[in-house]
Amino acid sequence: MSEYIPHTPADIRALLEGVGLRDVEALFSDIPEEVRRRFRPLGLPRRDEDWVRRYLTGLSERSTGKGLVPFLGGGIYDHFVPAVVEYVLSLPELYTAYTPYQAEVSQGTLTWMFEYQTMICELTGMEVANSSMYDGATALAEAALMAHRTVGGKKVLVPRSLNPRVREVLATYAWGAGLKLVDVPYGDDGRLQLSEIPEGACALIVGQPNFFGVIEDLSGLKDQLGEAFLIVYVNPISLGVLAPPGSFGADVVVGEGQVLGLPPSFGGPLLGIFATRGEHLRRMPGRISGQTVDAEGKVGYVMAFQTREQHIRRERATSNICTNSALCALAATVYLAALGPGGLRRVALLSLERAHRLAEEVSSLPGYELAFSGPFFNEFALRCPDPMGAVKKLRRAGIAVLPPEEVEKAGLEGALLVAVTERRTEEELARFVSALKGGMG
């Protein structure tokens, strides 16, 4: 069954006035009365869209068995996506649109690109954003290259607490550009420990939150770096409650935008967020839509910058990425517009509160403890004597978490990584705890 967007009372009134009917029942007056008497309400309470979807999915799963409840994280998260996102993405004029080379016939695409850029700037506290990149990992790699082109050094400081999968992509780009990645350790609190800035450093990368879910302290880092870039790799949902990196002097803010209206989908497609200061506009990769006026003074939109190799820049282009994740960026635009600042903050707070509640309950069990003492957002590393045994217990209870071998890639042994979003219910949190106690949930 396809999802639908419910009508508001105002929508219904406008529809009835347009066709000259007094109420909704009158719409069905052509159906014989004896047939209409067979109609009965679905019996669903007046609840939110996510609850109704879960309820109907639960009914359908009675015959197929229940799937795994995802407490998975590590860069991809299970957030609720309102039906309006899929509806807008499915419109043929948007679903089939490609590069807006001709502004006069691409006003719709250029308009939402401009809105996307504006919202990303508001979210990150930066002055300019491009209209998206492939994914967070390549956006980070492009930021490192931009820092090298601007500052001139060849050393990029990378915390051991950066997502290992993202680091792999960064390492590939660095190898091709002749850059050296320098490890920055983390302490008992899970936060990076930056003792000194080596000569020849062009950038420091900071995950916010980092791979372990720990919230880094960004204050004072830019002062330590001087001309070197402060590049912050963010989870955009966390910016619903955390101060934007721009307020700490960040030079570039990048991140994985999957959390903004895209389902996990086994790891793709994804969305690369890239924002920077205005002074770096011409060094930034990708495309930028701009607002202007036409000869008659009407507001219009144009492709303002596109420092790409296939256009006039040729070999002087800033990037070889030839396109953007346009449909995914449109999803993020609709998602952010639908939630608004208050809605995004609520999603962030619910995720944070439920993660902390679960962490408190699990860490009170014998043998289980939080790996780090630092503050965390919606994800936490959990130590236990038998991590694989814990994974098996959870799997038997229908729960999936990030396994120990993935966590070990960031240098932490004997731990699981647990992520909690606003979608995780009280029953699912209780089942998680029960499973680790030895029950089946």
Image (tube, rainbow, N blue to C red):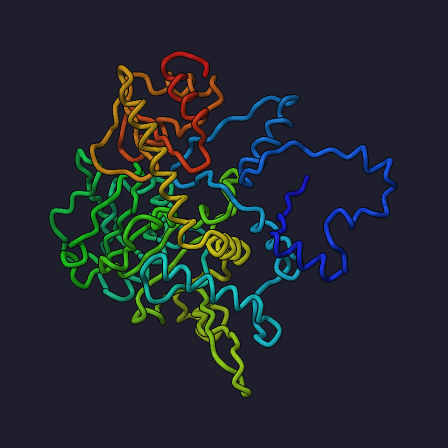
Q: Quadrant of residue 359?
A: top left
Q: Tell me residue 407's x, y (percent).
A: 33, 31
Residue appearing at x 46%, y 73% in the figure: 290
Q: Tell me residue 215's x, y (percent).
A: 26, 43
Residue sitting at the far top: 438
Q: Is residue 18 above or below residue 371?
A: below
Q: Quadrant of residue 98?
A: bottom right
For the image shown, how many numbered marks are present on the structure?
Answer: 0
Position of 249 with respect to 294 (left or right) is left
Residue sitting at the far bottom: 295
Q: Is residue 297 above or below residue 320?
A: below
- Quarter of the image with the N terminus is top right
Residue appearing at x 31%, y 32% in the figure: 356
Q: Tell me residue 369's x, y (percent).
A: 25, 23
Position of 174 with respect to 263 (left or right) is left
Q: Tell me residue 15's x, y (percent).
A: 70, 58
Decide which of 52, 307 is in the foreground and name it. 52
- Quarter of the image with the C terminus is top left
Q: Is residue 1 above or below residue 249?
A: above
Residue appearing at x 58%, y 31% in the figure: 55
Residue sitting at the far left: 195
Decide which of 338, 42 is in the foreground and name it. 42
Decide which of 160, 42 is in the foreground and name it. 42
